[in-house]
Amino acid sequence: MHQEVLDNIEEGKMSMDDALEHLDRELSKIRAGKASPSMLSGILVDYYGTPTPLNQVANVAASDSRTLSIAPWEKAMIAPIEQAIFAANLGLTPQNNGEAIMINIPPLTEERRKEMVKRAKGLGEDAKVSLRNDRHKMMDFIKKSVKDGYPEDEGKKQEESVEGIIKGYSGKIDKMIEKKEADIMTI
């Protein structure tokens, strides 16, 4: 029974790791005024009738802090790439020179920066809700195990362990959000 409790806690940790990875991916999509290839990571391009991730049909790079360059591997892909960027509604305007596509990243207004910080904090809160759900599942399992004969003092130790784990993950989320907020607010 002791191993089952430990396995349940380990499952909870893996779920929390997934929540952190998801948060990290979502935060990378929030642009901070600097050009980053990850800004275009969710874009799917119509590649001969098949929706294909942009990075599988072109090389995406940041030429400088304000410019993204997209070099398609086939010239015929320039128009579909442009259409996909417009369709993604990112507020970015692609410019094509016949060889590649350039995207100038406009500087963010103070109001827009505050909106992005608010969005980042919302994503952080979503991740914390996921942590709380995992905590609830682990605590319920421990309480059920105690009812089924698991020693009560061991159950209390495991509950304290779970609380410590939750605090640690919650702190990691706070640090991720603080870092993103500083990144967004830096001009």
Image: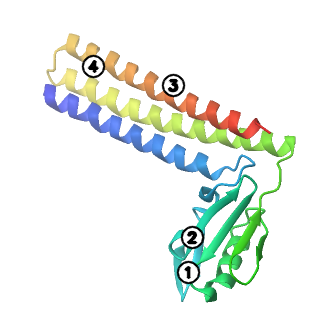
The foreground one among 184 and 118 is 184
Residue ID for mark 1: 73
Where residue 1 appears, as percent x and y from the top left, is 13, 28
Q: Nearer the viewer, mark 2 or mark 3?
A: 2
Residue ID for mark 3: 171
- Classed neighbour count for the residue bearing mark 4: other residues with Cα under 10 Å, few (<14), some (14–19), many (≥20): many
The image quadrant that residue 136 belongs to is top left
The foreground one among 69 and 148 is 69
Where residue 166 appears, as percent x and y from the top left, is 42, 25
Position of residue 81 relative to residue 68, above or below, is: below
Where residue 21 appears, as percent x and y from the top left, is 46, 45
Q: Are marks 1 and 2 in contact (CB under 8 Å)?
A: yes
Amino acid at dot 3? Gly
Residue ID for mark 4: 158
For the residues marked 1 and 3, what is the alpha-carbon distance in whole angstroms?
Answer: 43 Å
Amino acid at dot 4? Gln
For the residues marked 4 and 1, what is the alpha-carbon distance in whole angstroms?
Answer: 54 Å
Residue ID for mark 2: 59
